[in-house]
Image (tube, helix red, strand yellow):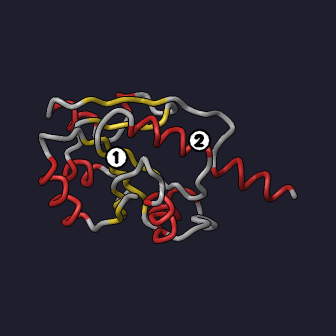
Amino acid sequence: MGRTLALPQLVQDLKANRGSRKVVFTNGCFDILHVGHVRYLQEARALGDLLVVGINSDASVKKLKGETRPVQNEADRAEILSGLGCVDYVVTFSEETPLELIKEVQPDILVKGGDWPPEKIVGSKEVLARGGAVKSLKFHPGRSTSTILERIQKL
């Protein structure tokens, strides 16, 4: 079971494991967890030894997705993600992008979904400059929080 930590504690925990374990990082809103998320997170975790998931704060989700989002607050989203066996750490960020978080976490591998080409992934330059890898994982069409909410609204 994963842990939700503030950034300073996360960085401290990762330093204790640095070198002996490969750290994978991804980020997103993860507003309504669905099978596309689960498959994506499992695939990300399989690339290394520890999976760190950065989640957008409630205010950040609202800016990105609109006034009706998030559906679930950041504490609930973090707890749900922490309950997945493939997730080791969850950390919340409030900035527009996760760039500063990525700089602090210093992942060995940075991943996003297949709708993001590697060269467009925020933090890719920094991770590659440190000798890390950047990967765009398989996208699962039709499986998104927005699609789920659209279906609910039609009921």
Callout 1: SS: strand
Question: What is the three-letter code of the residue carrying label 1?
Answer: Leu
Taking depth in this image into account, of 142 and 16 the one nearest to the observer is: 16
Question: What is the three-letter code of the residue carrying label 2?
Answer: Gly
Drawn side of residue 21 relative to residue 118, left or right: left
Taking depth in this image into account, of 97 and 23 the one nearest to the observer is: 23
What residue is rendered at 54% in x and 45% in y? 37
Measured from the top left, where is residue 70 in percent x and y? 57, 65
Q: Which residue is mark 1?
A: 51
Q: Would you say residue 93 is visible in this rendering?
A: no
Taking depth in this image into account, of 10 and 49 the one nearest to the observer is: 49
Distance, label 2 to label 1, CA atoms, is: 17 Å
Q: Which mark is residue 36?
A: 2
Quadrant containing the C terminus is bottom right
Do residues under tags 2 and 1 come within 8 Å of each other at their CB atoms? no
Measured from the top left, where is residue 120 in percent x and y? 38, 33
Q: Which of pointers 2 and 1 lies earlier in the amino acid sequence?
A: 2
